[in-house]
């Protein structure tokens, strides 16, 4: 269902050197599966696919049923790992114009992933007069962005529908015991789902963090889990055909040959948020101790008209990982036109995807010739099964890569720096000294 093709990278991945990296990737996989590496208290995600049982799927589907016909919009509140996985899967699986199409399922919109006042005001404006519900997701239960959004939305919901109805229309996904969100949920009597202690945010898409919003958007989470489960078996193998091994080996080889930027490329806009989810997964996992590949993403052919020039001829420090889709869900052909004023009759009878494919092959060749190695990861089609598989494969490859790089892939100490400054600037209790110092530094006093 998922295959990795390294042939396109040609001379950039010499066979003998690659074999050495495969051996290193096997060591990384062993460290991961044996739980002997740094951050081994955060490995709960490795076995998650096998733990998505009927009970969990049914609990998510109960919320779907509870809100069916009563709720037009679900606001999913969360940021980072508590947002990107669900958004990625929902965007990939949805109709491209889902926002304006009728559906038996509620529309899913997002909040708490930014602190834009315009966004907040316009979201409330959009919700005006609508039957809406909220899924608030935060592992720590204390993250500022979702906490602010939830405070606003909760108040708005209660004001519009009363506290009793609001209680039925709020679900919290958080830690089993800790955090402000858990306290609030218990006090208010909300339905809740638990994020296991040993699963970090960016590895949590296969917990209710991702599963509940995906189910609410109308998708089959049992199939998604099956895809992840099948991939779990494949990714546990010390085999040169294991896609996680191949990908981790190739990207680390390229990194150590001076390619410190990886661009995740798609040729289907449904996969735009795969790039966003992947950037967080790899960026937060690898970017530390002065090391790590910088993860970027582009959507082709759209961005061939913006980033194409740089990739073709800019600094030679990058490589591309193409996520390709073998089978499309639709067929659209170019018709012959009698007048042929646009000169496109040479394409008559061809499917748009055939043209897209030629754009991809042409780009691969041009970029490789221009000094940008290309890796390819292909899935059969965009559906729940393959999305589940892709999530798991990228997660395992990320754990292996982190260990190959020599970092702890499961912490994110650097994320705290901006928060400390922000709290000091906002005079949060407990930050008095830092507050004075930072205001002096910024000339605010
Ligand atoms: O991967 C991570 O740990 C982070 O991106 C978190 O998911 C993000 O900061 C949100 O945290 P929380 O779920 O605690 O609100």
Image: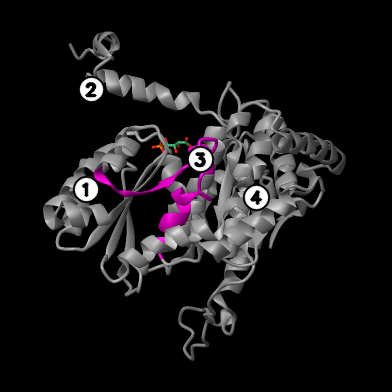
Q: Report how far apart the C-alphas of labels 4 and 2 lie in the structure.
A: 41 Å
Kindly state the secondary structure of the residue where label 2 is placed. Answer: loop
In this view, the mark in front (1 or 3): 3
Proximity of marks 3 and 2: CB atoms separated by less than 8 Å: no
- Give the mark nearer the N terminus: 3 vs 4: 3
Instruction: State the residue position of label 2.
Output: 426
Looking at the rendered image, the disc whose residue lies closer to the viewer, 3 or 4, is: 3
Q: Is mark 4 on a helix, strand or loop?
A: helix
Image quadrant occupied by the C terminus: top left
Residue on which the image places disc 1 = 153
CA gap between label 3 and label 2 equals 31 Å
Nearest to N terminus: mark 1 or mark 3: 1
Q: Mark 3 points at which residue?
A: 196
Give whichever of 343, 155 is nearer the camera: 155
Counting residues from the N terminus, which is met first, the one under dot 1 or under dot 2?
Answer: 1
- Magenta region: which residues? 188-217
- Residue, far right: 16
Q: Earlier in the sequence, mark 1 or mark 4?
A: 1
Percent coordinates x, y for residue 217 in the rendering: 40, 63
Residue 77 falls left or right of residue 14: left
Quadrant occupied by the N terminus? bottom right
Displayed quadrant of residue 71? bottom left
| Residue lying at 27% horizontally and 66% vertically, measured from the top left | 72
Mark 1, secondary structure of its residue: helix
For disc 4, the marked residue is: 393
Q: In this view, does 407 lie above or below 205?
A: above
Q: Is mark 3 on a helix, strand or loop?
A: loop
Quick one: label 3 or label 2, which is nearer the N terminus? 3
Circle number at residue 56: none
- The answer to whether residue 436 is magenta is no
Tell me if mark 1 has few (under 14), some (14-19) or many (20+) residues whose alpha carbon lies within 10 angstroms of its own.
Answer: many
> Residue 237's x, y, as percent?
78, 48
């Amino acid at each position: 269902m998922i295959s990795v093709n390294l042939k396109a990278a040609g001379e950039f991945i010499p066979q003998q050197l690659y074999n050495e990296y495969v051996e290193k990737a096997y060591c990384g996989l062993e460290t991961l599966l044996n739980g002997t590496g740094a951050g081994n208290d955060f490995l709960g995600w490795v076995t998650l696919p096998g733990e998505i049982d009927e009970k969990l799927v049914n609990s998510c589907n109960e919320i779907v049923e509870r809100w069916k016909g009563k709720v037009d919009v679900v606001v999913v509140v969360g940021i980072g790992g508590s947002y990107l996985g669900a958004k990625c899967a929902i965007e990939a699986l949805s109709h491209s114009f889902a926002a304006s199409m009728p559906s038996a399922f509620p529309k899913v919109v997002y909040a708490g992933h930014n602190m834009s006042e315009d966004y907040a005001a316009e979201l409330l404006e959009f919700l005006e007069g609508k039957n809406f519900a909220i899924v608030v997701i935060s592992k720590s239960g204390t993250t500022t962005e979702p906490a602010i959004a939830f405070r606003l939305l909760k108040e708005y919901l209660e004001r519009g529908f009363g506290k009793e109805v609001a209680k039925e229309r709020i679900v919290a996904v958080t830690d089993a015991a800790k955090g402000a969100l858990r306290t609030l949920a218990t006090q208010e009597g909300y339905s809740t789902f638990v994020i296991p202690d040993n699963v970090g945010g960016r590895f949590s898409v296969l917990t209710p963090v991702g599963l509940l919003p995906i189910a609410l958007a109308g998708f089959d989470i049992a199939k998604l889990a099956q895809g992840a489960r099948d991939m779990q078996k494949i990714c546990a193998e010390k085999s040169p055909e294991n896609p996680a091994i191949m990908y981790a080996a190739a990207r680390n080889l390229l990194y150590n040959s001076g390619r410190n930027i990886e661009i995740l490329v798609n040729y289907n806009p449904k996969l735009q948020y795969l790039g966003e989810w992947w950037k967080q997964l790899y960026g937060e996992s690898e970017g530390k101790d002065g090391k790590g590949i910088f993860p970027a993403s582009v959507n082709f052919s759209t961005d061939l008209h913006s980033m194409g020039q740089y990739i073709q001829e800019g600094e030679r420090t990058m490589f591309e990982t193409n996520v390709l889709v073998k089978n499309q869900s639709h067929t659209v052909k170019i018709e012959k036109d009698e007048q042929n004023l646009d000169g496109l009759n040479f394409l008559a009878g061809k499917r748009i995807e055939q043209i897209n494919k030629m754009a991809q092959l042409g780009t691969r060749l041009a970029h490789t010739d221009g000094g940008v190695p290309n890796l390819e990861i292909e899935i059969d089609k965009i559906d729940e099964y393959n999305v589940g598989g892709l999530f798991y494969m990228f997660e395992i490859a990320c754990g292996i890569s982190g260990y190959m790089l020599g970092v702890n892939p499961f912490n994110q100490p650097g994320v705290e720096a901006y928060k400390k400054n922000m709290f000091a600037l906002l005079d949060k209790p407990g930050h008095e000294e830092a507050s004075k110092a930072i205001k002096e530094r910024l000339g605010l006093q």
